[in-house]
Amino acid sequence: MLKNNIFNFGGGSLAQQEARLAFWMLAPTFLIVFAVVLFPVFANFWISFKSIELSDLRAPQPVVRERVRQTAEAAGDTMRIRYQMRNSSPEVTVTSITMSDIIPQGLELQTQDERCSLVGSTLNCNFGSWEGGYRENLELDFIATQAFFDSAADPLASDVSVAGKAPNILTNFNFSLENFRRIFSTSDFWSVLRTSLWYTIFGTLGSIILGLFAAQLLNENFPGKGLLRGLFLFPYVAPVIAAAFTWSFMLDPLSGVVNGLAMNYNWYAEPINFLSQKHVDFELLGMDFRFPLALAMVILFEAWRYFPFAFLFILARFQAIPSEMYEAADVDGASPLQKFWFITLPQLVGILSTLFLLRFIWTFNKFDDIFLLTGGAAGTKTLTVEVYDQAFARADLGAGAAVAVVLFLVLAIFMVIYFKYAPEGE
């Protein structure tokens, strides 16, 4: 009976009623997903179409400071209180500004200012609107009576209460393409985009290839295999800041191990600053080449640090390949290379394509590795570092959000291409 009452709610066919019930049961989950995942993405797109700086996040407001400019020594003397007033924003107008202050008992207002009135012990002022950059010193004179001295009150004991209204730049509907115009019109942006793609593609391929070699090696049985597997996980489980500083120390031109060994064996004449030298020129077969040194080092670090992730997945897939396939290949006289190409690799296509998808997304969004190694200098700046540089180093939050939108769109395009051309059934 209860089931029938539930499904008859709202009318319609049974399937429609069940669909409505399922929707309302899942509504809390949809709201949580929107709040945690989709809302930040929506907010980033929203900000990217606004010219917002970090200073704009603090809403414009009226600011008032109270000071005593002249004290009263005896009954009948004048006490002068100054209110230093200003608009915190140099550009935005603040409206409906009101101020209130508690005046000690025994002080009688003498200054005639149509904007202010003393009701009992409360001073009320209405200032209307202040344009951007507005400043004013309001001085009010009070006559002190004997009651003021009897109470021994402090005229600055109460805090001044001030309020006003100002438009919120984050919530208004003023949009423009200025941020995108500025970032696309600079040649640096396209250089950063190319660097991001090279870093992501070669870093992803490098980590997968190293993981494939490591898995192939440790798929065999030999003494100490378990210990070696644990050591291979060290780059991935080590704190990124420790790994980055270790590499920085090893590649240091003055005290680094790499330069020390190279100089000792006379591999080159002068120390090389691997993480600060953008290019190194060399000649090969009569042709001059320019090698991006610093970028190659951060790509190498990326491949080294994250190959254990690929290694674990590939090794698990290795162990799921039936041994009978290799035994049959041995009977047919297949070489190790033929067994790898015709048996192992086809069995690994699914896991390799999945790893490439995950590692591409994560590497393209990687920030901490490059920032710790080079800070984005020497031709290693990627889009994630550019987001940080625009939003925080230059305090241009709108431009930083615009770069983040471009980063999102590039990843979206990659995912569309990937799912369109990914192996069937994988």
Image (cartoon, rainbow, N blue to C red):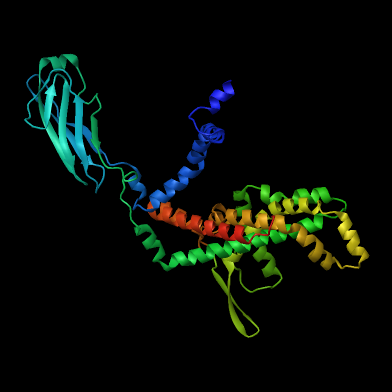
Query: Is 171 situated left or right of 93 in this image?
Result: right
Q: State the image coordinates of residue 190 (x, y, percent, origin top left).
A: 46, 66
Q: State the image coordinates of residue 86 (x, y, percent, origin top left).
A: 21, 41
Q: State the image coordinates of residue 7 (x, y, percent, origin top left).
A: 55, 28
Q: Residue at x 26, y 42 (%)?
A: 88
Viewer-nearest residue: 129 or 102 = 129
Q: Residue furthest bottom?
A: 286
Q: Is residue 282 visible?
A: yes
> Where, quadrant-wise, is the N terminus in this rendering?
top right
**Number of numbered tags placed on the structure image:** 0
Q: Is residue 249 visible?
A: no
Viewer-nearest residue: 128 or 39 = 39
119 relative to 411, above or below: above
Query: Is 226 situated left or right of 332 in this image?
Result: left
Q: Residue at x 85, y 50 (%)?
A: 224
Q: State the image coordinates of residue 135 (x, y, percent, origin top left).
A: 18, 43
Q: Residue at x 42, y 51 (%)?
A: 45
352 relative to 63, above or below: below
Viewer-nearest residue: 371 or 274 = 371
